[in-house]
Image: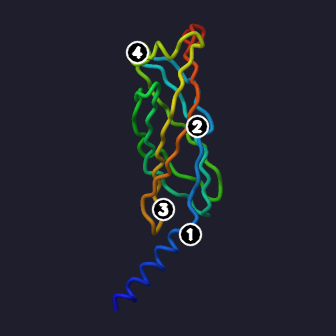
Amino acid sequence: MAQLVNKAKDFVAEKIANVKKPEASVDDVDFKRVTRECVEYLAKLSVSNPYGTSIPICEISYSLKSAGREIAKGTMPDPGSLKGNDTTILEVPVKVAYSILMNLAKDIGADWDIDYKLDLGLTIDLPVIGNFTIPLSHTGEIKLPSLSNVFA
């Protein structure tokens, strides 16, 4: 009897492992705006849905790191759903406090940008499987706003 149960478990695990899952990538991270409290950047994600029906997104969590330190962290609850058989573009606002930017003055240097690593977790609700998190990581450089950006 135990062998039959183990075979059933293996069969189900193999079928679930081979199920198509949505795929995601980080397209871009750009300056969005300056507020009184922080500088806001916008991360753009492309998520492809292989299913014919829409899939709800539970949340998007993010962590922005620079010079080995976490400079922004947060979650975006209930950002909508993924369109069926299509690619959905998601925009994730990332807010960085001024005090943290001042602490990164060494990294900023003469080129007026921040080297960063953005870690994202896109949690979606897949039928039968349940909540599934797609981990994403992206590295690059973010330009700091100039005076023309602040007063534009």
- Residue 124: x and y in percent read 47, 54
Residue plotted at (40% across, 20% down): 97
Residues tagged 2 and 1 counted as in contact (Cβ below 8 A): no
Vertical order, 51 against 13 (above or below): above
Q: CA distance from mark 2 to mark 1?
A: 28 Å
Q: Nearer the viewer, residue 57 or 141?
A: 141
Q: Disc 1 on helix, strand or loop?
A: loop
Residue plotted at (38% across, 88% down): 3
The disc labelled 1 sits on which kind of residue? Asn
- Residue 18: x and y in percent read 56, 69
Local packing at callout 1 (Cα closer than 10 Å; few below 14, some 14-19, many 20+) is: few
Residue 130 circle label: none
- Residue 130: x and y in percent read 42, 63
Quadrant that contains the N terminus: bottom left
Q: Which residue is mark 2?
A: 44
The disc labelled 3 sits on which kind of residue? Leu
- Residue 113: x and y in percent read 56, 18
For marks 4 and 2, the one nearer the N-term is 2
For marks 3 and 1, the one nearer the N-term is 1
Q: CA distance from mark 4 to mark 3?
A: 41 Å
Q: Which residue is mark 3?
A: 126
Q: CA distance from mark 4 to mark 1?
A: 46 Å
Quadrant that contains the C terminus: top right
- Select label 2 or label 1 by which is in front: 1
Residue plotted at (61% across, 34% down): 28
Farthest residue toward the bottom?
Answer: 1
Q: Which residue is mark 4?
A: 103
Q: CA distance from mark 3 to mark 1?
A: 14 Å
Q: Which residue is mark 1?
A: 18
